[in-house]
Image (spheres, rainbow, N blue to C red):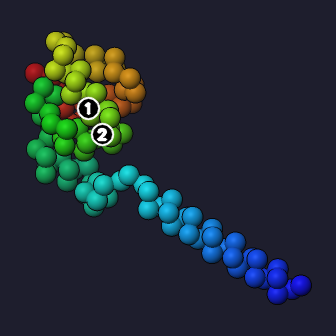
Amino acid sequence: MKKNVLYTGAVLLCALGIILCFVIGQTKTTAPQLLLSAEQRQELFRFPKSILEASKEDLLQVKGIGEKRADAILSYVSSQKLHSMEQLQNIDGIGEELLHQLEKYFYLP
């Protein structure tokens, strides 16, 4: 009886370990973001720069901007006449905090 309990516990512990390894391996943090500080990324990508000249790769350097938001920003910027950076808040998922992050990297000429 005691061996069955120990065996079951060991199997459950192994299964939990496998699940955790899988979940941890699924995080979507890119290597450059892990290795470089914000200041280093700004230097590498020559920030600040005009939001009108931003590339997808540039936008992905901003904390909180992923593939979908970068695409949404590029689409919005190419289809609208921007008068202020605050207009970016019209994009779904961009609020005051994310706008503040964007303004550290980009400006509107």
Q: Position of residue 100 (x, y in %)?
A: 32, 30
Q: Which quadrant would the N terminus be assigned to in this image?
A: bottom right
Structural crowding at the residue carrying mark 2, measured as other residues with C-alpha within 10 Å and reported as few (<14), some (14–19) or many (≥20): few
Q: Residue at x 76, y 77 (%)?
A: 8
Amino acid tagged 1: Asp
Label ID, residue 15:
none
Which disc number belongs to residue 67?
2
Could you say whether the residue bearing mark 1 is in a helix, strand or loop?
A: helix
Q: What amino acid is found at the position of numbered circle 2 in the picture?
A: Glu
Q: Quadrant of residue 102?
A: top left
Answer few, some or many: residues within 10 Å of disc 1's Cα (few below 14, many 20 plus, some between 14 and 19).
Answer: some
x and y, in percent, of residue 64 in the image: 36, 39
x 19%, y 14%: residue = 80
Q: Nearer the viewer, residue 66 or 2?
A: 2
Q: Quadrant of the C terminus?
A: top left
Relative to 94, residue 105 above or below: below
Q: Residue furthest bottom?
A: 3
84 or 52, nearer to the observer: 52
| 102 versus 28 height, above or below | above
Where does the image place residue 76, in percent across and percent down from the top left?
A: 24, 20
Residue drawn at point x = 28 percent, y = 16 percent: 87
In this orientation, does residue 60 appear?
yes
In this rendering, position of residue 56 left or right of residue 10: left
Q: Which mark is residue 71?
A: 1
Q: Are marks 2 and 1 in contact (CB under 8 Å)?
A: yes
**Residue 12 appears left or right of 37:** right
Q: Secondary structure at mark 2?
A: helix
Task: Name the residue: 42% across, 55% down.
Answer: 27
